[in-house]
Amino acid sequence: MDPKAHADGTNRRNAVVVGGGIGGLAAAVALIRCGWQVEVLERAPAFEEVGAGLSLWPNGVRALDALGLGENVRRRAMTETEVGIRNASGRWLARTDVRELGRRYGPVVAVHRADLTEVLRQAVPTAALRMNAEVTGVEATASSVEVRHTAGVSRADLLVGADGIRSVVRQSLWPGHRAPRYAGYTAWRLIVDTGGHPSTVGETWGRGQRAGIVPLADGSTYFFGAANAPEGQRSPDGELAEMRRRFNGWHAPIPELLAAASADAVMRHDIYALPALRTFVHGRTALLGDAAHAMTPDLGQGANQALEDAVTLAAMLAAHPDVEPALAAYDRQRRARAQMIARRSRLMGRVAQWSWQPAAFLRERALRLSPPSSLLAALAPAISWQPPALEPANRPS
């Protein structure tokens, strides 16, 4: 492509990233590092995340290191001390050897989503960020992509759809693809200001219900619950009351966390997953994160996979002079892996949500009898990923 033909009048290739969440901002950072001019379109009035935490597994941390942001995130994060599963009475069912995990693959860290978003946002020039820009349509030609949005029209050599599970980019260019499917359970998330870290962390599995405790670096605690429920259901007396009904009889410190929680801090979202796409790319458009492979949260890999996507996309664009071959390489690198992890996550969720008492009993027994190395082996395919190099290739004149 002749650089003089670029719509922005510069000699730099330009990209539009739709979506200002973790995946979209990470893609912007990665592309900028490889010499692209980037515009990020975010429909919300600000680049911010809701009050929830997440675990960054070694693969996600390595992706951040590839972006030059790993140390900045680690300073804001809490190294997790336990990775395992208990039953509702508090008995350990399975534990991972955290020291061995760290020795082999690197640490698991917990971070507030807002902190991770802020680190990524600060790495993108302010001029590249456009808020209140809701995408209304996409048109693709052989040489460019045009994105219509409420703030105007943007044209680019590359479009990155990072606009979540209900992606407008995907709906525009993948019109026949199936809609996201309800996973059969709903989830509550909240941050509790505990003033210190609880002694018990990890997940707790009951019958058709789960809870999780994740300490954060500022002394607060990220708490989540999940339960089998009809799609779209809401509690008439509030979601905190519903959580207390379901989980107050579980082991400490779950009742104490719920007692300290604020009702307005509780978020409830039904869990959905995206049926597998046949391709993550269409001409000069690439999907990443939830727009490409929205998965259930059961392996804690959603944000980690979005970070992997961002680094790999930029690396393929750096390694290939032309956009479409680069996107084909990105699809080869990412689709099979992300969809494999999505399948494993969905399977884990089904087992974790078993409500039939005999099945739950056998599940507990199997977990107790499994050696600690088995959980580490199960995690290995996800967390052993290594990032490709972000090195710009020579461009044709």
Image (cartoon, rainbow, N blue to C red):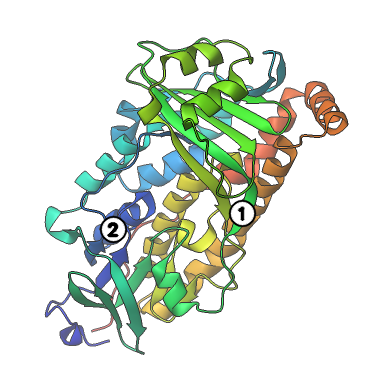
| Element carrying mark 1 | strand
> Sequence-wise, which precedes: disc 1 or disc 2?
2
Left or right of 350, for residue 137:
left
Where residue 246 appears, as percent x and y from the top left, is: 61, 24
Local packing at callout 2 (Cα closer than 10 Å; few below 14, some 14-19, many 20+) is many
Where residue 180 appears, as percent x and y from the top left, is: 56, 61
Where residue 196 appears, as percent x and y from the top left, is: 38, 10
Name the quadrant containing residue 267.
Answer: top left
Q: CA distance from mark 1 to mark 2?
A: 30 Å
The type of residue carrying mark 2 is Ala
Question: In the image, is residue 278 above or below residue 39?
Answer: below
Question: In the image, is residue 32 above or below residue 202?
Answer: below
- From the image, which quarter does the N terminus lie in? bottom left
Image point (43%, 82%), residue name? 283
Looking at the image, which is closer to me, 187 or 318? 187
Q: Residue at label 1? A: 182
Image point (80%, 30%), residue name? 360
Looking at the image, which is closer to me, 141 or 1? 141
Left or right of 223, for residue 52:
left
Q: Residue at label 2? A: 28
